[in-house]
Structure formats: structure tokens, C-alpha cells
Amino acid sequence: MRVIDFFDQGATLYPDNVAFHDLADGANTTYEEALVISHKVASALHKKGFGKGSKIGILGPNSNIAFEVLLGIFRAEAIWLPINPRNPIDINVDLLTRFDGDLLLYHSNYEKEARAIAADTPNLQHIVCINSTDVEGEKLADWMFDADDFHQIGDEMPDDIAAIFPTGGTTGKSKGVIMSHKAIETMFTNFYSHFNYYDNTCHLVVAPMTHSAGLIGALHFARGGKNVMMAAADPEGILNTIEAQKITHFFLPPTVMYMMLAHENVRNYNYSSLQHFLVGAAPTSLSKLKEAIDVFGPVMTEAFGQSEAPAAICAKAPWDYMNADGSINESRLASVGRPCVMNQVAIMDDNNQALPKGEAGEICVKSNLVNPGYYKNDQATAEVQIDGWLHTGDVGVMDKDGYITIVDRKKDMIITGGFNVFPNEIEQFINSQPAVQECAVVGIPDEKWGEAVKAVIQLKPGEFLSEEEVITLTKKALGSVKAPKSVDFVTDLPRSTVGKVLKADIRKQYWSTSARNVN
């Protein structure tokens, strides 16, 4: 099934359910209403020459109209280019150019940005406003004026492409992951198998639709779930919305969860509606996961994946780590869960050989979850897809029960005095300190050690911690090799537009005057 097929199932079974609720203006769109809009949009796109295989970007905030138009793109059998409005204009120009964007649909909030993008992207044939008739230029309402009420979608083909997703781009230009409907269907199957998706779920779309939140929102279609659209990830706004809208499910990167936990009012709201608070996209602090369980209840959920194998290589539900007596199995909580049911997952050495349980190696996956590769980049595809296995670049250990704990990213490993040190272990410890909101650990140049361990720390508002305290505490807990040789405190850690800490940017400031560079 394609994404639009999951939606059509929901529209057939639950036509009167609210599909989308926009917090910005309070507007509701039922499944029946969204169905009508999706047909009109698909017909309008085809009449203007944008059919199967056309590459169409949407530039706008999380909103009802953005999701409704996305459904129209899928019904038209076009390819979605997720364009994050938080990106600088030159980044979005680069993505639309390299991924051969044909059409950009934009929200009026981003009219200026859309026109700037169009000016520098010659392959774009049109830019069209999706939500207003008061702007200059082309408007989707005009395109839809003579569109048909029904658009006949073609038969599903096994390798049809749904989207080209930019990779995180934390170490250079984003690659374009060719995302197939087959991979998305497998992701959905894995989530349905591991988590609760019953009738009348209420999902908060607060992470950008252009990231995992859009696809995770589509998971709720088949059983008539509601997607509550929130344009900005304001910590207290999220806390308030959980209570006010009785949110059952939502996804956030860990860094936003940390901001919520640090908020002074975090314990003043009712979270009893929550079933799954899903964190992913980056390693999560064990101590903060435990704190989140204490605050939000035993609803904390993790999924491990990447654009190349979306969101569902491994999964961990509350029942995986909660013991019968209500206590927490900490080793399982520290893991990213077990391989999802539709995947083969192995821990491999540098010779692409599977390692026994208990040994650290690269996490690799073979599954229909794995996407075909990178757009117009066969070399990069060949580097990560070897003998049918996707090599994730993450180092992990599988325990006797199949739970996988991520040690670190292969590229993040620090070699200091001949010892291999993985920053994640150090970050986990420093993040457990009550004053710390978030920490990043990198290797910096050092004449004696080659690389020295550096901790860069963002403290919670109003808290204090000294460099000496951090070094002493870490040395006592982890030993002198893993203890930071120095500590910097910053107001904010550098982050990508989806909230990932940009370790490459942190390293760069320390390696800029060095003769060599480990990035």
C-alpha cells in the first residue's frame, strides 16, 4: 500500500473523523473533506502537467493545508521533496536544484523565501501559493478552479517512489534518499506491530512535517486518527497542548524533550492521555529518559532508523523496559530496542562479517525498509549498501535477548593516546548531572594524546557547574582515559533545523588551525 492508500482506508471507514486540526487557527478538516481536497489537488496538478514522477516541494509550516496538499501530491503519483522552511534559502535552492525540483508549492508565510528560491532555481517551472488568494503570482485555488472532483490513481508498482528525503547534512551537503512506498509501508508495518495504533488516536505533529513527523502522522490514517498541527516546537506550548488536546502520540528529537524537562512548569500539566511519546533521530540520555518516565508516565518510546531505512530498524515500547512490578529494566531502557519484525538486523565487523552477541560492531539491516539508494549518487549508495545490507554507520552491541544498545557513530570515535573512546558513553554520564541540559563530546587536537576529549555543555537555566567538577566526576565514574581534558560551557549548542546537535560544527572550531582534520 502507498501512503494515499492508507489515507483512503481511513476516509472510507471514518469519513466524519477529524483528520487534521490546526492549532494556528482552530480549523478542523474531516477525512471526507480532506479526501475531496486531495482529489482536486491531484487533478489540478495533472492538468498543469505535473503527473507521475514530477518532483514537487512544499515550503510551509506544519498546517492542515500543507498535509492536505501532500495527500494530493501522493494521489497524483508525484514525488514529494520535503523542503524545510527552517533551512537557509541557499540550502533549499541547492536541494531543489540537485534533486531536479519541478514545482514549489508554498504557504503565504514564506512568500518572500519562495520567490528568492525561485529566482535562483532555474529548473523550477512554477511556484504556487497553497493557502491565499491575496499574494501576487500563481495560486493553487486558481489551479483547482476547473479541476475534476475525482482523480483516478494508477495501479501501485512495487518500486514507485514517494519522496526524495534529504539526509541530515551534519557533515556536508545532504544526499537525497530515494524513498519508496515499499519502504514506507514496511515502516508502517513495523510500527503497527510494535506500538499501539487504535481507533481515535490523537497525534501531535510538532517536529517538522519534512522530517519524521510527517510520515509518522500518516501512520494514524488507517484507523481514522487525528493529526494536530503545531507550527513551532515551543516547550510549554507542547506541554499545554498535550493536556488541552488529549494527545495520545507524538514524536520529538531528544533535544526538544530535554527542553521540556527543563521547563519550570513541566510537572503542572496532565499527561494521562499519552500512550506513546516517541523520541528518536539522535541518541537519548538514559538519565533524561528515566526523568521523562517519571514526568510523563511509562509512555516513553524509542525507534531507531535513518532516512535510508526510515524510523523503524529497531523499536522499544514501554512494555519492553517496564518490569511487572513497575520497576525499570535499565539495560533495556538504554537500548534502542529489538529489530523490528520485518527486518533482518546484524552487528558486523569491518570485514562485513556478523559478530556474536555481546560484541560491538556496525549495525546493519536487510529489509524492504531499506530504500533504493541516493538520488544520482551511485558511489555513495555503493558505500553503504554492501551485499544487500545497509550499513548504518552506528556502532552497537546486541545482548542475549536481542536488544541493541548504540555505542556511538563510527565517525564520532575519538582516538586518544592509542585508545578508542566513544563520546556517547561520556555524554550519557555528563547528561545525567542535574545541572546539565545537554552535552556534546568531541575530540580536539592535542600534541601529547593526538586527540583530547573535550566536553561542550549547555546547562539548564539558572544552574552552575564548573569545569573541575565535570572532569573530576567523569574521571571517578569512567576513568581518566574517558574523562574530558577540558570543558566549555555554551548558551546553546549548534543544531540542525531538526534539532540534531551539529558535532561537525563543534569540531570545526577546534580543528580550524590544525594541520589535520578528523571530521
Image (cartoon, helix red, strand yellow):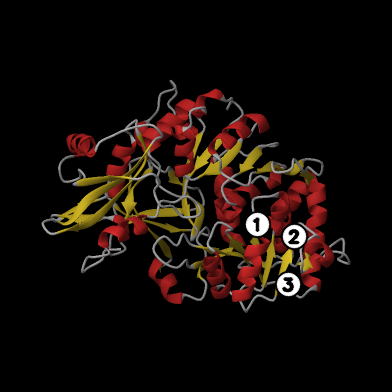
Figure quadrant of the C terminus: bottom left
2 and 1 marks in contact (CB < 8 Å):
yes
The amino acid at mark 3 is Gly
Residue beneath the point at 62% across and 61% down: 181
Q: Which residue is mark 3?
A: 51
Tell me the quadrant of the picture where the N terminus can be found.
bottom right
Q: Amino acid at mark 2?
A: Ile
Residue 506 quadrant: bottom left
Q: Which residue is mark 2?
A: 130
Given this view, does label 1 or label 3 mark the residue nearer the observer? 1
Label 2 SS: loop
Label 2, label 3: how far apart the Cα atoms are: 18 Å
| Residue 256 position in % (x across, y down) | 49, 42
Residue drawn at (65%, 63%) of the image = 112
State the image coordinates of residue 16 (x, y, percent, origin top left).
82, 41
Q: Mark 2 against mark 3, which lies toward the viewer?
A: 2
Which of these two is toward me, 349 or 392? 392
Left or right: where does residue 379 sit relative to residue 228? Answer: left
Res 80 visible: no
According to the image, label 1 marks what residue? 60
Above or below, comparing residue 188 to residue 247 in the picture:
below
| Secondary structure beneath label 1 | loop
Identify the residue at the far top of this view.
325
Q: Amino acid at mark 1?
A: Gly
Label 3 neighbourhood size at 10 Å, few (<14), some (14-19), many (20+)? many
Q: Residue 66: percent from the left, percent from the top?
A: 69, 55
511 in relation to 432, above or below: below
